[in-house]
Amino acid sequence: MTANWFEAKVKYMKVNEDGREKKVNEAYLLDAMSYTEAESRILHEMESVIQGDYYISSLKKSNVTEVVPSEDEHDDRWYKAKVAIIDADEVSGKEKSTFQYYLVAASDIKRAMENLEKSLSTFVVPYEIASISDTSFMDVFPYFGEGEGQVADHLKPLDEIKEETE
């Protein structure tokens, strides 16, 4: 199942190291099924991060198709990569490119390129990395985080249901 990525901007008052308050507008990327769920999820995620009042200043569908996380704790920035998937038109014989956008966790541009290349190494079709640029995303919230694939308490796995009916 492909992810539906949404870009959310959250505005709130942040206290700097020197104790002064500053109004900030931070960007986040999250996976959700709809705008309503995206709004609900970002509000839920921000409750644990932000003390005080905050609001969603922007919520829009993102053109990001894939997120490439990193296990390295130093990879604390997010870079957006435009990747051209090259395909040959069977009728005309000409090559055409379809673009996909990746969000890559890395500490710098060079590391972003390495992480992206590692992620794309399993591709069997030709591709070309068209661009990589820094983003302002503070964090990314995938649909499944820790415990991916766990079944909610009120649901049963299909295997258990089949055993009960047999």
Image (spheres, rainbow, N blue to C red):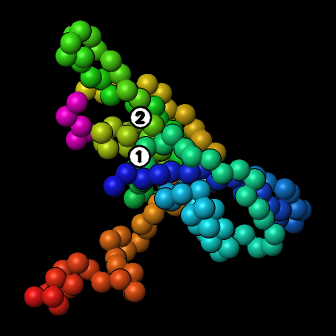
Q: Nearer the viewer, residue 153 or 101?
A: 153
Q: Nearer the viewer, residue 110 or 129?
A: 129
Q: Is residue 39 left or right of residue 77?
A: right
Residue 79 point in image, percent of width and height: 52, 41
Quarter of the rendering containing residue 21: bottom right
Q: Which residue is mark 1?
A: 66
Q: Which residue is mark 2?
A: 100
- Tell me what residue is drawn at x 19 percent, y 16 percent: 90
User: Mark 1: which secondary structure?
Assistant: strand
Question: Which comes sooner in the sequence, label 1 or label 2?
Answer: 1
Name of the residue lying farthest toward the bottom: 164
Residue 105 point in image, percent of width and height: 47, 49
Label pair 1/2, CB-CB below 8 angstroms? yes
Q: Amino acid at mark 1?
A: Glu
- The magenta stretch is 121-125
Up-down relation of residue 95 to residue 44 (above or below)? above
Residue 147 point in image, percent of width and height: 37, 74
Q: Is residue 98 left or right of residue 123?
A: right
Q: Amino acid at mark 2?
A: Gln
Up-down relation of residue 116 to residue 19 (above or below)? above
- Tell me what residue is drawn at x 81 percent, y 69 percent: 53
Q: Is residue 38 left or right of residue 53?
A: left
- Tell me what residue is drawn at x 76 percent, y 73 percent: 51
Cα–Cα span, label 1 and label 2: 8 Å
